[in-house]
Each structure stands twice: as C-alpha cells, then as structure tokens.
Amino acid sequence: MSPPERSGGHFFEKGETTMYKEITLKTPDGEKRTVPMLANAATPIRYKMVFGKDLLNSMMFTGGTDLDIEIIGRLAYLLNKQAIKADLAKLTEDDYIDWLEGFDSMAFIDSAQEIVGVYLGSRGNSSKAKKTVARQPEK
C-alpha cells in the first residue's frame, strides 16, 4: 500500500491531516511483520465507537508516560485497519483480540513510541490551520 499524498504546505489539500507509516512488529514465532498504520481526524471518534473509550482521555490519564499497553494495542489495531481500508463499521473487540494474537506480547511495548507518533503526527497541523484561517484578508 502506498502512503497518502502529502501536500506542499497548503492546509486544505488532500493528505494534510493524515499520517501514514509502516511499522515493523514481531509475531509470536519471532518473525518481523510490516504493519501499515494511518491516522486521521476520525481516529479518536472511531476509537470510541469500537472500544467505548475516549482515546485522548485515556492517553492523558496516564500523564503522557508509560502508556497502558492496552491503549497502544488498541490504537495500533485501529490505525492498521484504517490503513488497509477495512470496513470500520464491522470492527469489534473480538476482531481486535484475533488481530492481537498475531503479534508477540512485547511487540507493542517495543514500538509504542512509533505507534503513538503516527497518531500524534496526524494532529500536528491544528495550529497551522488556525493561523492560516486567521490570516485571511478582510473583504
């Protein structure tokens, strides 16, 4: 899968508020598997729809350090499903557990910073957007 298009700095162009990355995770048999991940503005909404929990509150509750491995695993699952364009309306906890069983128990701990970075990278343009809108000339 190819990454989404990145724009040349214009706020409203396609891909400006998305973050795509391929992350290597270990499987239970020790093999390495490349997992595409995509974050966008809908990520926190979809997280709440699938898991019934607010992603931002969950991340802030930990104080930004030592994030719960469950949050990281759930976030990785959702980012992967968004990247592969799965039918997001059909995601369930059972599907998450089945997906999770395909990885080593330490895979998400070892890659936590990268996984969270994909999500946070999609949020990096919010202040730019405000500045762009604020500078529009008066009529």
Image (tube, grey):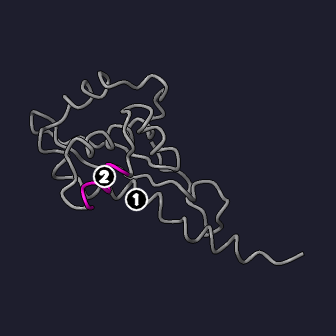
Image coordinates of residue 102 in percent, x first then y, are: 20, 30
- The amino acid type, in three-letter code, at marker 1 is Leu
Residue found 28% across the figure and 43% down from its top: 34
Tell whether label 1 touches label 2 (CB within 8 Å): no
Query: What residue range appears in magenta?
Result: 57-63
Quadrant of the snapshot with the C terminus: bottom right
Judged from this view, the residue extending furthest toward the left is 29
**Element marked by disc 1:** helix
Residue that mark 1 sits on: 120
Q: Nearer the viewer, mark 2 or mark 1?
A: 1
Residue found 40% across the figure and 31% down from its top: 50
Q: CA distance from mark 2 to mark 1?
A: 9 Å
Above or below — where is 43 with respect to 92?
below
Residue 132 badge: none
Position of 21 with respect to 5 (left or right) is: left
- In the image shown, does 13 or 94 lie closer to the viewer? 94
- In the image shown, does 35 or 63 lie closer to the viewer? 63
Image coordinates of residue 133 in percent, x first then y, are: 70, 70
Image coordinates of residue 48 in percent, x first then y, are: 42, 37
Tell me if residue 62 is in the magenta stretch.
yes
- In the image shown, does 77 or 4 lie closer to the viewer? 77
Quadrant of the snapshot with the N terminus: top left
Q: Earlier in the sequence, mark 2 or mark 1?
A: 2
Label 1: few (<14), some or many (≥20) within 10 Å?
some
- The amino acid type, in three-letter code, at marker 2 is Ile
Position of 65 with respect to 12 (left or right) is: left
Above or below — where is 29 with respect to 133?
above
Residue that mark 2 sits on: 115
Image coordinates of residue 104 in percent, x first then y, are: 13, 38
Using the rendered view, name the quadrant where residue 129 is placed. bottom right
Tell me if residue 31 is in the magenta stretch.
no
Residue found 45% across the figure and 45% down from its top: 44
